[in-house]
Amino acid sequence: MIVAQGLTKHPILLVVEKPERAVAITTMLTQAGYVVKVAGGLYDCLKLCTQEMVHMIICEVALPDGNCVNVFDKIAADKLLAKIPILAHSIKKTPEEIGLIKSRKFSSAYAGAIDPKVFLVKVSDCIKNYAPISPFYYGAAECGFDENLTLKIESTVMGRVGEQILVRSGSEVDQAASMVCTPKNTELAPAILRMANNIRNGDEVFNLFPVGRILGKGRIWLEKLPIFNMDGGAAAPAPGVPVATGAPRKVIFCDPNEARFASYKEILQGYDIELIYAKTLNIAAGLLARSPDGIGGIYIHELMNDSSGNEWKVSFAKIPMTSRPSIICGTTVSGAKNTDSMRFIKRPFGMGILVEMMESTFTRASKIASVASAKGPTQVAGTSVALQSPATIVGLDETGGVLQLKFPLARGSKVELVHPEISALLGVKIVTITEVASVPNMPDVVQARFESIAPGMSKGKYWEKIAGTLATKAAATKAVAAAAAAATATATAAAADPAEDPAA
Amino acid sequence: MEMSCLIVDLNAGDAEAKWNASPASKEALLDTKFATNPEDALAIMASVMVSPLIIHVQDYSQAVQTLLSAYQAAFGPMSDFQVIVNSDPSPQFMVSVFEFGVEQFVANETWVAEVSAICRDVKEKMSDPECAEYKTMSLVIAVRSADAGQITEAQAAAGDLATYDFRAAYANGKASEATGDYSAAIDNYKSATGMNKLFRPVSTRLGEACLITGRVDEAIEIFQKLERSNPRDIDRKASLASSYIEKGDFEMAAKYAAEAEKLDAGSSRVVEIKAQVMLCQGDFTSAFALLDQMSNVGPFFAAKLNDLGIKLSKSGKGKSALSLYQKAHKVVRVELKYKITLNAVLACRRLGDFDMALKYVARCAREYGSLFPKLAKIKETLEKERAEQALAKAGTTPPTQVG
């Protein structure tokens, strides 16, 4: 199975004779996206390898307490660490140093003063060849696991806010995700929820799903949910009047192109959304500062990479948290990560998507949290559900593993893996998504790296616990495959060489 | 269900070359067809099952409207299966295609990979008979084929899908329209709008169905609500003008007609309004003359033309009725042609021209997709009457059947 690039931030251990020599290389490797640890000799190296389960060792030939050959032999002798590739680095290029390098089969070698470009290519090639995901990685198929699993997020459906369903899940759900909402109450049918918008209030995460996008039989009960009244108990609005969602339906539209604003203004007023024009972020900041509570949201067509962004940040930070409107920011980048105050909308987008997103900006997380706590759990719908999605397990390594699914998961999401073997093997049900990437040329094939290691736990200890099982399973799978291949070969040979006819 | 991806390059660019050169297209899993103009695209849609439909275009145009209308008529309201390739669409473009429920735009730089992903999605959904999309599309295709048996079968397969899926409710509405049951169609469309308020094609259909059934005030309310969020849609302005003509409020009708004319003076819909006013004023000759300038006439005006033809035929002006039907047949939407032909059959019968009537019967069956029960009964009667006429001409009476 192809594994998407960029899922892993590879940890590299630099083993140097003199610590000052590590400074420049550390900077260079860090800038290239690696996580660098430095060891001052053989002893440090072995200790850090076990602790950090590094993906590569760059080892100078001469060390204060040994040399690169000692490192090679010790690592090779350790069952847990034997797969870590080692790049031997000879600074002096003396025949003795070269001789030492040649005496062992190092994964790679470098001699002389460091040329950053050449050195980085060496490192990158070494990682690509020996540890594209991790040197400790086991593919799920290689271990004979059933690759299918279910991702699950335990949640509570709280009610309707206007034309959106409000869910408290504690986890962000990506806008491109389609999640099957399965109620605990089996009398209620499941539904597919799509086009999520996430709102945060401190540690609390709420998801808003547009009612119009719900598919499946479950929409029948979802549609009938009580209104989660943001006015804190005021009477239900008259038909045709927009439901109170905690913020006014006014949006600052920030775009240098005034004609575009004019067109959107004309269209969106048909959806009861009033647009206010701001040519620049500075003007938007001014408008917001004057009346933060009078603004429901801000749309920025494109965030410029200039000083205006910083000025905006300063202005925005001055506004009290409870009055800060949500910001929708257009971007051409896929999978841009939302923050507490900013949600990205991938351009080009369709009109319905923009309207749904603007609708969700009018719902303030702080308001939801305060209304929910003031009313208590009995006055909201409070239907326990599981948001689920099918996925496949690609493989496991020293901190977790890689999953594959059809849509991106938000980084930092906490999801439950439902699998007959994997969750038992990992010893945890809930894992954290740390990185997400698409497979090249296939935007609908998304891979996510997850961490299943408990906070504070040593990677070495964690891996020691599961590596044995994985190795045994891999060996058994290999043996079965070999036996099957042998049986096929025997059958083929028998067919090609039929027994002599005794009668002949 | 075997589907083909149709890529229409209205930019006359190199979409086909780019698609074929990209490794991402190899993962699309669907057969791909290419067209560079609406005519070729329509011919492909008529010959194979198309999904997804991909249109490369700079801005909204008559060609885009033709393609989206044709796709919707043939394959239904599957907005996930229609894509516009345009990196920076104008708001007006976005809102114009949103009238067809289309809201998927992809950038010129990434379109091959994204379309390839959509193709895989289509392949998966259309291979699963339990999937909502599969059931909805089967129903739309059945409606399109106008085969009553096929429609019943598709409706049975869909089960209660229409009660919780707006696309299926829309398709059910179309099925009811096809059988002339506008009241059931209205119920279905209302149910669909309740489920997804942003899905504009169903609101438009609901307005049209209300207008046809004489619920003019309701139609006006629906059209005006839609008008607020897209005040530059010529079809809706024409629908509003038609509704106000029906209501007898000629001042408002003139206002919307003028606005429609301002948007596109040469539009067929503008001509339709003018003809409708003339019909209202009893100026049939002038209205008749305008028919040549129309195209793709919708159900409301088609119904008006049918009504006029029936009146002419009943009042003994059968030949005038037939020539009206002949012109009307050329200008109405494909799915409405069989109704015109059916009226032509009845006009011929009144004229006593049974041979011609039977020719129209054959054409009607072809257009409807089958010999539906009402048409079969008419055919039987016509054949009997033709035999009687022949015998009468020969001066004999038919022999009495024995046994």
Image (cartoon, coloured by chain):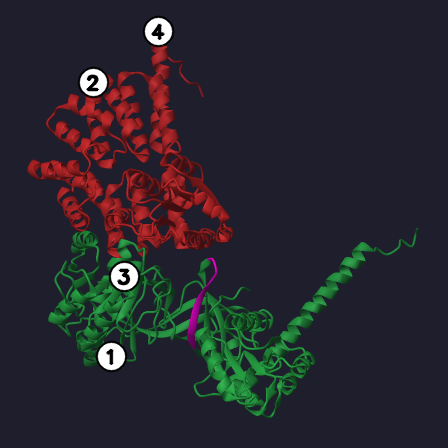
Chain colours: A green, B red
> In the shown orientation, is residue B292 left or right of residue A488?
left
Callout 2: helix, strand or loop? loop
Q: Quadrant of residue A217?
A: bottom left
- Marks 2/4: CA–CA distance: 28 Å
Circles 3 and 2: CB atoms closer than 8 Å:
no
The segment highlighted magenta reads A432-441
Instruction: Give the tally of numbered discs.
Output: 4
| Residue, disc 2 | B317
| Residue, disc 4 | B395
Decide which of A49, A379 is in the foreground and name it: A49
Q: Which x, y percent locates residue A418? A: 47, 74
Count residues near mark 1 (Cα–Cα under 10 Å), then give few for <14, some for 14-19, many for 20+.
Answer: few
Please, what is the three-letter code of the amino acid marked with disc 4?
Gly
Q: Which x, y percent locates residue A162? A: 21, 64
Whether the magenta-drawn stretch holds residue A297 is answered as no
Residues behind callouts 4 and 3 on a single chain: no
Circles 2 and 4: CB atoms closer than 8 Å:
no
Position of B173 relative to B373 (above/below): below
- Marks 4/3: CA–CA distance: 88 Å
Mark 3 or mark 2, which is nearer to you? 3
- Please identify the dominant SS of the magenta region: strand
Count residues near mark 2 (Cα–Cα under 10 Å), then give few for <14, some for 14-19, many for 20+.
Answer: some
| Residue, disc 3 | A302
Tell me the chain of label 2. Answer: B
Q: Residue at x 34, y 29 (%)?
A: B375
- Marks 3/2: CA–CA distance: 66 Å
| Residue, disc 1 | A377
Mark 2 or mark 4, which is nearer to you? 2
Residue B147 is at least partly visible in this image:
no
Please, what is the three-letter code of the amino acid marked with disc 1?
Pro
